[in-house]
Amino acid sequence: MAITAGPANFGPLLFAGEWERGVATAAELGYDGVEVGVRDPAAPALQRLARAVRESGLTISGIATGQSYYNDGLSLTSPEASIRMQLLDRLKAAIDFAAPWRATLFIGGVRGRLEGAPADHIAQREYAVELVRACAEYAAPCGVPIAIEPINRYETNLINTVAEALEFIDEVGADNLVVLADTFHMNIEERSLPGALRQAGKRLGYVHLADSNRHAAGQGHIDFHALADVLREMGYTGYISAEILPLPNSRAAAELAIACFRSLQ
């Protein structure tokens, strides 16, 4: 399940700013690990969180990077080179944090939006390609995969579907790039959720199960049993995580999510 070391301007996180309770609850409920939203990789709280995860017997499965954009306005597509370089340094530090866990680094909201006239979008997209390529090169010796997450059109206009994520990955041209499939976003953008998973194929590297309303899986209208059948058919062996709204509260959402996960086995 997705947690964070501090408060965040991003809603679908459990125990945001209460990472001690988040780690303890994940261990108590039988989760295998947590994915961690990272704003500043040098923050002392993040190091304490990592120690607590290790002591609990859990793992860190993924590193979400969107807070650099949602909290600080840093994005891959910024026209300002100084902002892009600041973000690249931060992403490299996040890769260093991920390395001992072989955790997957997410490129989701941190890419920002394409702004201005359509003619400006070409350069902005190229900025994103260049920075992701630099991250992938830095991450490769560490054994850290980089996951490109399609996000719905209401949040970004860059990479909304699995097909577009695959196109972006081909453009970057790095072997350690994978697709992060998030069912909440897929429910808005994809013609067929099972079809999109199959399209990702062997490049599917991480999965977020969140329902149509971004509540815990099983609280909306998505057929997760059908998706679980597809993942089994594909031979998917990666992590499945709950990046969900803390509703009705974080504890209850965590309980609902893992109950649904177990029903899919």
Image (cartoon, rainbow, N blue to C red):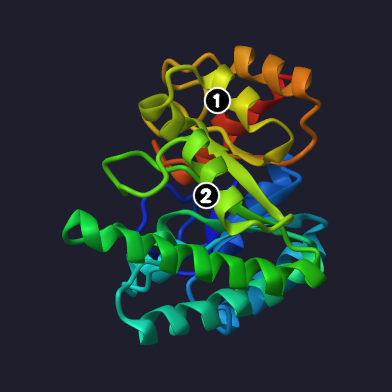
- In the picture shown, does residue 195 fall above or below 17? above
Q: Residue at position x 62%, y 80% from top?
A: 93
At numbered mark 2, what does the secondary structure look like: helix, strand or loop? helix
Q: Which residue is identified by label 1?
A: 196
Q: Which residue is identified by label 2?
A: 168
Q: The C terminus lies in which quarter of the figure?
A: top right
Q: Residue at position x 43%, y 64% from top?
A: 126
The percent position of residue 81, horizontal first and vertical second, equals 37, 83
User: Three-letter amino acid code at disc 2?
Assistant: Phe
On screen, residue 8 versus residue 252, left or right, reads left
Res. 21 image quadrant: bottom right
On screen, residue 25 versus residue 159, left or right, reads right
Residues packed near mark 1 inside 10 Å, few (<14), some (14 to 19) or many (20 plus)? some
Q: Residue at position x 42%, y 25% from top?
A: 187
The percent position of residue 152, horizontal first and vertical second, equals 36, 39
Q: Earlier in the sequence, mark 1 or mark 2?
A: 2
Q: Is residue 212 visible?
A: no
Q: Residue at position x 58%, y 18% from top?
A: 194
Q: Furthest residue to the bottom? A: 82
